[in-house]
Amino acid sequence: MKNNVVISPSDINGHSESSPREFLSDRSFVIGPNDPVLITGATGFIGSRVVECLIAMGFQNLRCFTRGSKKMDGLEAIISKCSPKRRIEVIKGNLLRREDCDAASNGATIVIHLAAGTGEKSFPDAFMNSVVTTRNLLESSLRQGCLQRFALVSSFAVYSNRQKRRLLDESCPIEEHPEKRDAYCYAKVKQEEIVNEYAQKTGARTVILRPGSVYGIGNREITGRVGIGTFGLFLHLGGSNRIPFTYVDNCAYAIALAALTPGVDGEVFNVLDDEVPSSRQFLRAYKKYVRNFKSIYIPHFLSYGLCLSWEKYSEWSQGQLPPTFTRRQWSSLWRKTHYSNAKLKKRLGWSPQVSTAEAMQRYFAKGSQDEQTA
């Protein structure tokens, strides 16, 4: 994978967001265009793009599940552009309730499961809103008797990345002790475990996707792989590390292909783009085009020492100092690593619909415009 992306667009404000491109029509899928497809988390940053992608691919019968009435504007705008001949249904509910799961999965041949707890910092909340909800949805979907594929959207966060090898691909081990990391990692690892368990016990056809750092218009947060804001400063911890970025439209396309492509049952796919920038390149461009702020670069040997000292003191104080920085976190986020999307390309025939250079131009052009109007 080439790593020569340059983020210094001279005409950055000349770019605008475009709708998803039309996809090749000569592909074969596990279902027909009129078969029901359920997308959970359909109003989310990635979920709404998945809905848009499926529409562009010609699917006519989509069921969009959302937990509440907030953030509906994006999905409603997508639906409003569709032909009235398409059946696009929006269902509001809570996957912790079995009856809501039954209503959502009724007749669904494909389930694309994006809904998960993202804001919860406590382990019990994350478990309930990611793992229990996934179990409920799986059970309801299987009871229907028509499920052809259950696609779980997981995360790069599940990898331990503590092995000596520097290339991270789908063969790398996942975190054996996610409870020693954070609630999000714990929930994603357990979510994958329950999907694999149901696949083994029931023969359910499943596929798991692990996106890297998803970015695009609508998500202005800087990934923790670049650094962390703390003590009133931004600690730049990524340095020259390549960040496993995936532009949201490219990620949505990968999710749709994994859910629909024959012959990939039981597979896991990393999702990241080509020519991903380094942490330093991204932070420099972010500060120039989106928001300028003070940051301090922490070299890798110092960041590792900080995490080691913090972890030991947290253990000695019996948790009085929260384990915010640990060696497991360091290995996952800031260890020098290279990433592979070879399997995604080979097995799914995926390629980025938007190049990294163009995606970054769109992203930073929007950030520059927001700054000018603020």
Image: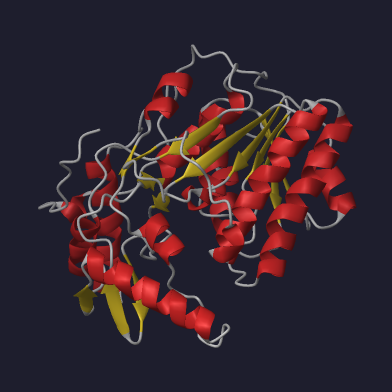
Q: Nearer the viewer, residue 152 or 57?
A: 152
Image location (x, y in percent) of residue 318:
58, 84
334 in relation to 253, above or below: below
Q: Does residue 194 appear anywhere in the picture? A: yes
138 in relation to 286, above or below: above
Residue 18 is left or right of residue 106, and the answer is left
Q: Does residue 92 appear anywhere in the picture? A: no
Residue 141 is left or right of residue 176, and the answer is right
Image location (x, y in percent) of residue 358:
25, 43
Image location (x, y in percent) of residue 201:
81, 31
Residue sitting at x 85%, y 41%: 140
330 in relation to 11, above or below: below
Quadrant of residue 285 within the rendered picture: bottom left
Residue 265 is left or right of residue 19, and the answer is right
Q: Nearer the viewer, residue 60 or 278?
A: 278
Quadrant of residue 366 within the rendered picture: bottom left
Q: Looking at the figure, which quarter contains the C terminus?
A: bottom left
Image location (x, y in percent) of residue 34:
70, 23
Q: Looking at the figure, which quarter contains the N terminus?
A: top left
Residue sitting at x 30%, y 54%: 363
346 in relation to 122, above or below: above
Residue sitting at x 60%, y 65%: 183
